[in-house]
Image (spheres, rainbow, N blue to C red):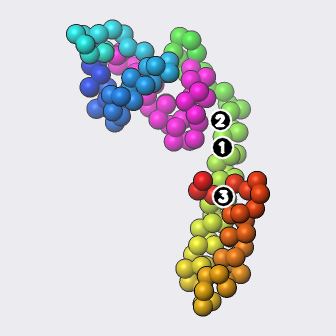
Amino acid sequence: MTDLDIAEVARRAGVPASTLRFYEEKGLIAATGRRGLRRQYDPGVLERLALIALGRTAGFSLDEIARMFAPDGHPRIDRRMLSAKADELDRRIRELGVLRDSLRHAAACPAPSHLECPTFRRLLDEATAPGRRVPGR
């Protein structure tokens, strides 16, 4: 299969060409050359971009994703890192569930004011507690 033009890679991967250039600067992908001024990529870059997109969706930083590739470009994914990220996502899901339930309660609460609702007050207190990571931030 022949190399793909940067515009074709961008179209197929669903990312702007500027993202491809940025990923190239970060060492996540590499162009195989140029045709005129346009970068060319091996078709395998699409799979690599899919792995990058999956990693970003899971919450990995670009530096963490870069470490998931061996110097030859093949995936080298640390299973412990995946497990730790899954644990982090479980914690986040629980936090968001509590936040969702509190907001639903506040939306239907019969208290005359949200500030008079004990559930809403507890949500406010948790949001302002020192060192507390507020869901959504």
Give the percent coordinates (x, y) of residue 121: 70, 76
Query: Can residue 47 be seen by looking at this rendering?
Result: no
Q: CA distance from mark 3 to mark 1?
A: 19 Å
Check disc 3 and give the amino acid type.
Answer: Val
Q: Nearer the viewer, mark 2 or mark 3?
A: 3
Point out the tag, 3 or 1, that comes first from the N-terminus: 1
Give the percent coordinates (x, y) of residue 54: 50, 37
Residue marked by disc 1? 86
Give the percent coordinates (x, y) of residue 109: 60, 85
- Circles 1, 2 touching at the beta carbon (< 8 Å): yes
Residue at left offset 66%, top offset 66%? 98
Check disc 2 and give the amino acid type.
Answer: Leu
Q: Residue furthest right?
A: 130
Residue 48 placement, left or right of 110? left
Which residue range is magenta in the image? 41-69
68 drawn magenta: yes
On the image, which quarter does residue 22 sit in?
A: top left
Badge number at residue 82: 2
The quarter of the picture where the N terminus appears is: top left
Residue marked by disc 3? 134
On the image, which quarter does residue 77 sit in?
A: top right
Label 3's element? loop
Residue 32 placement, left or right of 125? left
